[in-house]
Image (tube, rainbow, N blue to C red):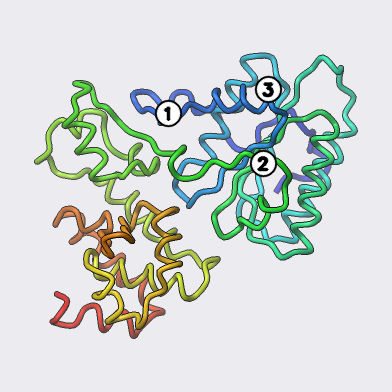
């Protein structure tokens, strides 16, 4: 955390460095600059509501790069890894400082607030108040949060919400062929963290060995899919699907008990990792798409499942091997 005597709002990006070099040969489904223009025309705030590893922070960095290159003053606030109370206190302090800063009315200002934690009604009300103050001071505001923190955007008036579909990324490859794109999507499903872990040339050769960078990134993504901020019922469903890898909802019910279709529909909407398809009542996790990937991640999954002994033991019984 920054020391009090060194803090100077707006002079140092809190989200990290530029992401222009990272994008390279990778492409977003919708570029961030499109949304900045929309925000400016409508004066509406923007919210990125998606799972971890979906590139929310990188999207905000790209938005900051584009805005700064067009003369905007950009303020960046990171709330990552903070409790609801800590995040609310920092947001209150920084938003007050931004609002009190003397700026010409001709200067366009953009405030980016990354990674709001899940919060109760008291802290959500204070967070909404800070966002409202920034907007009243003439700032455009863009925020990011995970789906379990969605309560915040339900309280922000006129917010324009981007979800999973707008954050998907793909890698066309040097040959720009349809086969390269299909191979990439099969291994990544558009999850930015996985897309960036593959070399540009990899997907041109479908039988190539999966690089260790991809396997390591996949293990990281899997760990975020079982984060502690999720409710216990959703966690059980996610863990069950991970341990089975692929199957039907009936298979899932054998280890989880009766499955809640509302939770599964939510997972289908938010988390491409699991490949949930409610209409056909099936799922197929990314790590089950190739044997070498599944074999690498078996130990990782067992470690993740260690606190759920019933699911772990039943999923690895002979009937499921």
Residue at x 68% of width, y 22% of height: 41
Mark 1 Cα-neighbour bin, 10 Å: few <14, some 14–19, many ≥20:
few
Depth check, mark 3 against mark 1: the one in front is 3
Q: Mark 2 points at which residue?
A: 159
Residue 64 as seen in the image, left or right of residue 271: right
Q: Name the residue under label 1.
A: 22
For label 3, the SS is helix
Q: Which of 233 and 196 is in front in this view?
A: 233
Q: Where is residue 8 in the image (x, y as percent from the top left)?
A: 79, 33
Label 2 vs 1, first from the N-terminus: 1
Residue 210 as seen in the image, left or right of residue 89: left
Mark identifier at residue 41: 3
Distance between the Cα atoms at labels 3 and 1?
29 Å
Distance between the Cα atoms at labels 2 and 1?
28 Å
Q: Which of 10 and 172 is in front in this view?
A: 172
Q: Compared with residue 9, is residue 306 higher up or lower down, i.e. above or below?
A: below
Q: In which quarter of the image is residue 264?
A: bottom left
Q: Compared with residue 50, is residue 169 higher up or lower down, i.e. above or below?
A: above
- The reply to whether residue 186 is in sight is yes
Residue at x 75% of width, y 20% of height: 108
């Amino acid at each position: 955390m920054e020391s009090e005597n060194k803090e100077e709002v707006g002079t140092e990006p809190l989200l990290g460095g530029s992401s222009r070099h990272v994008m390279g040969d990778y492409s977003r489904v919708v570029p961030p600059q499109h949304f900045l223009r929309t925000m400016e025309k409508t004066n509406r705030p923007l919210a990125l509501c998606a799972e971890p590893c979906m590139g929310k922070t990188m999207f905000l960095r790209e938005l900051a790069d584009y805005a700064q290159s067009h003369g905007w003053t950009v303020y960046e606030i990171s709330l990552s890894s903070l409790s609801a109370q800590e995040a609310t206190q920092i947001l209150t302090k920084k938003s007050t400082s931004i609002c009190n800063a003397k700026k010409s009315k001709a200067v366009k200002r953009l405030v980016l607030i990354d990674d709001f934690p899940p919060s109760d009604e008291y802290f959500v009300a204070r967070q909404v108040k800070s966002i409202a103050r920034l907007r009243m001071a003439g700032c455009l505001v863009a925020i990011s949060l995970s789906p379990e923190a969605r309560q915040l955007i339900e309280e922000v008036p006129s917010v324009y919400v981007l979800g999973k579909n707008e954050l998907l990324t793909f890698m066309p490859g040097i040959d720009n062929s349809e086969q390269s794109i299909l191979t990439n999507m099969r291994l990544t499903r558009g999850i930015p963290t996985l897309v960036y872990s593959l070399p540009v040339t990899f997907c041109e050769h479908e039988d190539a060995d999966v690089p260790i960078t991809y396997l390591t990134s996949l293990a990281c993504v899997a760990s975020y899919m079982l984060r502690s901020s999720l409710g216990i019922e959703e966690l059980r469903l996610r863990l069950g699907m991970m341990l089975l890898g692929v199957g039907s909802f009936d298979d899932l019910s054998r280890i989880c008990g009766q499955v809640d279709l509302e939770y599964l529909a939510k997972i289908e909407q938010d988390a491409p990792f699991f490949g949930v398809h409610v209409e056909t009542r099936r799922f197929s996790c990314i790590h089950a798409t190739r044997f070498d990937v599944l074999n690498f991640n078996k130990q990782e999954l067992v470690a993740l499942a260690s606190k759920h002994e019933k699911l772990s033991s039943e999923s690895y019984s002979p009937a499921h091997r």
